[in-house]
């Protein structure tokens, strides 16, 4: 399987992803929730007023948990 095909499969976001970023979603009140899943459990990273803050929290958690 070509590498670019695999990358396309991994980068597709679900149709119901309104934020455009994995692990970030908008709450009913309009705030942004950041979360990450690890070993089958979902961990909330916080609720933020700005979408960019939630995205940053998610990216920092990814680096902290998944990069050596």
Image (tube, rainbow, N blue to C red):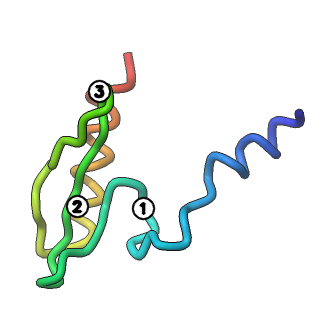
Residue identifier under label 2: 54
Image spot of residue 8 (x, y percent): 72, 51
Q: Is residue 1 above or below residue 30?
A: above
The residue identified by callout 1 is 21
Q: Residues within 10 Å of mark 1 (few under 14, many from 20)?
A: some
Q: Are marks 1 and 3 in contact (CB under 8 Å)?
A: no
Q: Secondary structure at mark 1?
A: loop
| Above or below: residue 4 compared with residue 52 | above
The answer to whether 7 appears left or right of 4 in the picture is left
**What label sits on residue 35 in the rendered view?**
none
Q: Residue furthest front?
A: 40
Task: Characterize the local packing of mark 3: few (<14), some (14-19) or many (20 or more) Cα atoms within 10 angstroms.
Answer: few
Asked if the residue at tag 1 contacts the one at tag 2, i.e. Cβ–Cβ closer than 8 Å, the answer is: yes
Residue under numbered circle 3: 65
- 3D distance between C-alphas at marks 2 and 3: 17 Å
- In the picture shown, does residue 24 fall above or below 32? above
Front-most of 42 and 30? Answer: 42
Identify the secondary structure beneath mark 2: helix
Residue 68 x, y percent position in the rendering:
37, 15
Sooner in the amino-acid sequence: mark 1 or mark 3: 1
Residue occupying image coordinates x 18% and y 42%: 43
Q: Which residue is found at the position 25% from the left and 35% from the top?
A: 41
Distance between the alpha carbons at the discs numbered 1 and 3: 18 Å
Quadrant assignment, res 55: bottom left
Question: How crowded is the residue under tag 2: few (<14 C-alpha within 10 Å), some, or many (20+)?
Answer: many
**What distance separates the C-alpha of mark 2 from that of mark 1?**
10 Å
Looking at the rendered image, the quarter that the N terminus falls into is: top right
Find the residue positioned furthest to the top. 68
Residue at screen point 28% across, 49% down: 58
**Nearest to N terminus: mark 2 or mark 3:** 2
User: Does dot 3 land on a helix, a strand or a loop?
Assistant: helix
The residue depicted at 26 percent of the width and 29 percent of the height is: 64
């Amino acid at each position: 399987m070509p590498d670019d095909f695999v990358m396309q499969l991994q980068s597709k976001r679900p149709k119901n992803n309104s934020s455009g970023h994995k692990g970030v979603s908008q709450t009913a009140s309009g705030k942004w929730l950041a979360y990450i899943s690890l070993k089958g459990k979902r961990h909330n990273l916080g609720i933020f007023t700005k979408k960019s803050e939630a995205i940053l929290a998610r990216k920092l958690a990814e680096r902290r948990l998944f990069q050596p």
